[in-house]
Image (cartoon, rainbow, N blue to C red):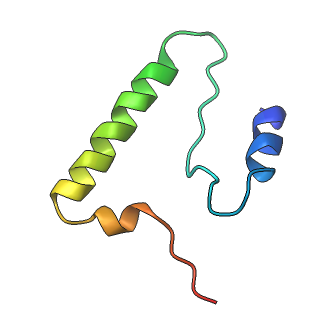
């Protein structure tokens, strides 16, 4: 888990994922996560809430 935290923190600002998955046992959780993310994004866009999928920071 620590390696994943270090990887994410090291990514450039604006490219860090909102979620991350660590599949310790290789039970297919990563594949299920990918499908659920795609469905979540498509649904948000379909109901007119796609603009909420990205963080917008004002300075």
- Residue 48, given in percent of the width and then of the height, sits at 19, 65
Residue extending furthest bottom?
Answer: 59
Quadrant location of the N terminus? top right
- Residue 36, given in percent of the width and then of the height, sits at 35, 34
Q: Is residue 5 above or below residue 57?
A: above
Describe residue 19's horizontal placement relative to residue 10 as left or right: left
Describe residue 58's horizontal placement relative to residue 34 as left or right: right
Q: Residue at x 60, y 39 (%)?
A: 20
How many numbered badges does the structure rendering display? Answer: 0
Q: Residue at x 39, y 39 (%)?
A: 37
Relative depth, front residue between 13 and 22: 13
Q: Is residue 20 above or below residue 52?
A: above
Relative depth, front residue between 4 and 25: 4
- Residue 55, given in percent of the width and then of the height, sits at 51, 68
Describe residue 57's horizontal placement relative to residue 49 as left or right: right
Q: Is residue 41 above or below residue 26?
A: below
Relative depth, front residue between 22 and 16: 16
Quadrant in the picture for residue 44: bottom left
Quadrant location of the C terminus? bottom right
- Residue 19, given in percent of the width and then of the height, sits at 56, 45
Quadrant in the picture for residue 7: top right
Q: Residue at x 70, y 63 (%)?
A: 13
Q: Residue at x 64, y 53 (%)?
A: 16
Residue extending furthest left?
Answer: 47
């Amino acid at each position: 888990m620590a390696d994943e935290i270090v990887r994410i923190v090291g990514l450039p600002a604006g490219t860090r994922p909102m979620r991350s998955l660590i599949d310790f046992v290789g039970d297919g959780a990563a594949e299920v996560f990918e499908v659920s993310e795609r469905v979540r994004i498509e649904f948000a866009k379909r109901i007119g809430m796609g603009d909420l999928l990205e963080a917008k920071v004002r300075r």
